[in-house]
Amino acid sequence: MDAHPFIPNSSDEIRKKIMEKLGIKSVDELFRDIPSSVRMESNKWDELDIGLKKPLSEIEVKRIVSEKLGKNKQLRIPPFLGGGAAPHYVPAVIKYIISRGEFLTSYTPYQPEISQGILQAIFEYQSLMAELLDMDIVNASMYDGASALAEALLMSMRVNKNRRKILLPSNMNPFHREVVMTYLYPHISQGRVIVEDIKYDPVTGLIDKEDLKEKISKDVIAVYLQNPNFFGLIEEDANDVSEIVHEYKVLFIIGIEPLSLGLIKSPGELGADIAVGEGQPLGLSLNFGSSYLGIFAIRDDPKLLRQMPGRLIGLAQTIEGGERAFAMVLQTREQHIRRSKATSNICTNEALSAIASAIYLSLLGRKGLVKLSRHIYYKSHYAMKMMRKNGIRANIFNADFFKEFTVSFNEYNISYQSIHEKLLEKGIHGGLYLGKLYPELGETALFAFTEVHQKQDIDLLVQSIKKSWRRGSRYV
Amino acid sequence: MFRQAKWSEPLIFELGNNGREGFLVPELEKEILDTVGEIHIPEKIRRTKEPELPMLSEVEVIRHYTRLTEMSYGVDNGPVPLGSCTMKYNPRIAWEIASDPRITEIHPLQDIRTIQGLLEMLYELQKWLANITGMDYCSLHPAAGAHGELAGILMIRKYHELRGNSEKKKYIIIPDSAHGTNPASAAMGGYSVIEVPSSKDGNIDIDALRSVVDESVAGLMITNPSTLGLFEENIVEIANIIHEVDGLLYYDGANLNGIMGYARPGDMGFDIAHINIHKTFGAPHGGGGPGAGPVCVKDKMIDEDKGISLKDLLPGYLVEYDEEKQMYYLKKPSEYSIGALKAFFGNTLPLIWGYVYILMLGAKGLRMVTEHAVLNTNYFNKLIENTQGLELPYGKDRPRKHETVISAEKLYQDTGVSAEDIAKGLLDAGFYAPTIYFPLIVKEALMIEFTESETLENIEKYAERIKDIVKTTYSNPDEPKKWPRNTAVGRIDIVKANHPKYVAPTWRVYLKKLKRYSTGEKQ
Ligand SMILES: Cc1ncc(COP(=O)(O)O)c(C=O)c1O
């Protein structure tokens, strides 16, 4: 076989040199300790369906993949989908910096002296995110917003060891709830914790404070509030919730949307003990749900810090001369040191995504962030108003919203699916159907509008919905 | 001669100037402003305190981060032989393909009819990974190796529950050479950990294993080859011992690079396995992540009557193919699935890197990968054999696989120079250091994994450098404590950085402490 470009020693000459030095005639000698009963024969292996069996050139691979991706259907405008991720613009600067090999191809910076740049970049992410959230300490990232929340609840259980109940709002992201239930499962199945729902008010769509008051007690570990909630609604009484929660010394966890924080009170201002969120809107492409950013932040409290999961980069100094430097800190919480007593098993995280977000926050600055928040607010409200003008029931709840809102077709006896089909025919992807996740909402969908949707896109959507509905099939 | 850039780059907070902007948000059309009017968010929830973000132009931002990249080091810069991390070359073609807008612009909840091409690729990847590992089904859902481990442990828990044994199954057995994520994952899954020692030859001590195995054992987690780079010769017997008590065998796939095409976990008796796409299959580590950790199973029957098998417990979504509609679709494995571990499908971008990597190499090429990873390891061992102060512990005469672990204990005893000092000496030569102080069973461990990507010349230079370091150490044991000199900064005071009085994981905490201690010492 030819020498392979990824394997510099694969030429016959070099392989021979190495084998001579090792005193072996065949490479198989290096595998002699694999018992024959489990050894794979090369002729059998070569026939397995793995890639196209033999090496291919870049030219061939490029063509194969391009043909496959050609089977995807190109949408005419970015989808109006939210529900935990949404189309947002990613500045070219971000794409350029995170594609540089010094960052992209580096490992977790275990050797700080040669990794100062990436350590500083992650430290800056932690610090910039702390300002955005108005929280003190942010870790170097979790896998995504959902797992960050799950870990926040596990952490809360360790902090409030003798309590047994977790309260989750029923208007939180149901995909995040599913992840929470997976992570909590061992504890639930062993009776160590119970999860209870806090109802949402069917009129406002906001968390039902009375229900919360009824359910809260000294046995509650933590209360979660997602703001804006899954329906896109701004939890305007978050301050009251905070007071109720803290009266019982319960940990208050707020789930945020980073781009809303130019307009909406920060978790710090609302008295959150822990803040979590999905960082995707902050400089990350949609990627079919990939390579997002789990934001995880706490108040500066040693009790919380000791139990915090994930990696932390801290300021440091050189031994000689006391120069400013950066290094991983408080590692004794982590799996490689504390093993089964660690605060989490997380090792590989989403560092590069965190850096992408840091770059975006640097570009936006305090003015840009507020402008972008406003921009998204206006775009989504314009969509809502235009829908209403055209007789479409937009935002079925009577609270204000950010970026996302519900659209209901119940009154008109139209299935959302039929509208979705009509839109898709035109290359427009409508919102997320909610009837399965929230049966009480029936033929309702969740639509998202961001800075990537232009006015004419929104107008086209509204007109298309209106048309599809006139021609729309009856309830199916 | 190596000299890393040193910019003394200020923090982003110390850069910029009032009023600068780095990104223009498009202006809103008058019609939008008129239609919407004022912002209606109630005052009580309006942010009053502006976030204290810096103000920079685009030019400054790009210069700042470019300088930071210049003070970083990855596989594109030179050898990164971090043991256990499989820091191989990350093919740029995979980067290019993973940057294709036909992938990056896909929303995770998009109609599957619009993403058939992508699903086809993911479907193929599931199949290829199953064939590589000898398992039956793979879920691409977990976001990293440890995430796959958690999935595996939760599946083990579910397995015993479905068999009515959850009460008595309490322990996961893990060898003392295991990676920290293994015991941490077992604990997250609600199990206690029993550690078993390794024998002199580097295998698991079978007698010790037998002595702890009884009906309370839920499963065993191991890598094979081990973190010592040695193939577990008694794997079949170990599998039998665990299966006899209805325990499950979990394969930590971090070391798969050492056996591809030579042995498969599925053939060794493993029931569940994860794969680190960001190790074995060429996806980059990005300074810590993102990665992808698919988890695979043998289709082992759990409940004959109900027809439940291990496949049904898999997490997340599987890509399946509907022959009739000729369409790929996403499906939750079953009502018995352990559920989702993250929102949405999985870490698709690293998975695409893996897809491209496997397509570039095929079965034949992957076997070649392992062959050369192993040749490189043993070649390096040969080069440093008989170096004063260094020893190859465990199974001295056995060939290594993907990595080797060398102990500098003797050197440390003789001179006081530690594995860490050696690491810093390697940095000074423009090489990344090995993994040090892991596995825990080797004192002053230097864990070295060149992978198949390293050149003969660099392996030789690396060995030479280590020998030079040893020579210096014996003649002048104070010298290594002054390393590194050629990196952006010199040796860092880790103790102080962790001191409760100084520890500063964010700029705002630093400023707060600075204020509090302003009369005392500045950090
Ligand atoms: C042996 C071993 N197991 C598990 C892991 C965890 O994998 P990940 O970092 O992808 O979570 C690692 C990674 O360093 C490893 O080396």
Image: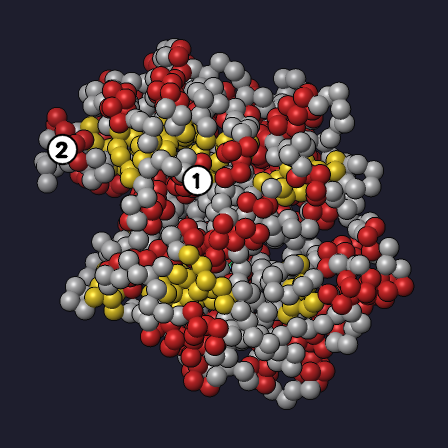
* Residue A388 in view here: yes
Left or right of A432 in this view: B68: right
Quadrant into which the C terminus of chain A falls: top left
Given residues B39 and A2, the one toward you in this image is B39
Q: Is residue A159 above or below residue B157?
A: above
Residue B414, picture quadrant:
bottom right
Q: Is residue B137 above or below residue A469?
A: below
Q: Please tell me how crowded label 2 is: few (under 14), some (14-19), or many (20+) other residues with Cα within 10 Å.
A: some
Query: Where is mark 2, residue-wise?
Result: A414
User: Which residue is at a point 57% across and 49% down the rendered structure image?
Assistant: B288
Q: Is residue B421 above or below residue A401?
A: below
Q: Position of residue A149 (x, y in %)?
A: 40, 38
Q: Position of residue A185 (x, y in %)?
A: 32, 48
Q: Residue furthest bottom?
A: A25
Q: Please tell me how crowded label 1 is: few (under 14), some (14-19), or many (20+) other residues with Cα within 10 Å.
A: some
Q: Three-letter amino acid code at disc 2?
A: Ile
SS label for mark 1: helix
User: Which residue is at a point 68% across and 51% down the rendered structure image?
Assistant: A111
SS label for mark 2: loop
Q: Position of residue A298 (x, y in %)?
A: 50, 31
Query: Where is mark 1, residue-wise?
Result: A158
Left or right of A460 in this view: A321: right
Q: Pointer 1 and pointer 2: residues touching (CB < 8 Å)? A: no
In the drawing, what numbered circle is on residue A237? none
Residues at marks 1 and 2, CA–CA distance in whole angstroms:
49 Å
User: Which residue is at a point 36% across and 69% down the rendered structure image?
Assistant: B214
User: Which residue is at a point 34% across and 28% down the rendered structure image?
Assistant: A218
Left or right of B340 in this view: A355: right
Quadrant into which the N terminus of chain A falls: bottom right
The chain letter under disc 1 is: A
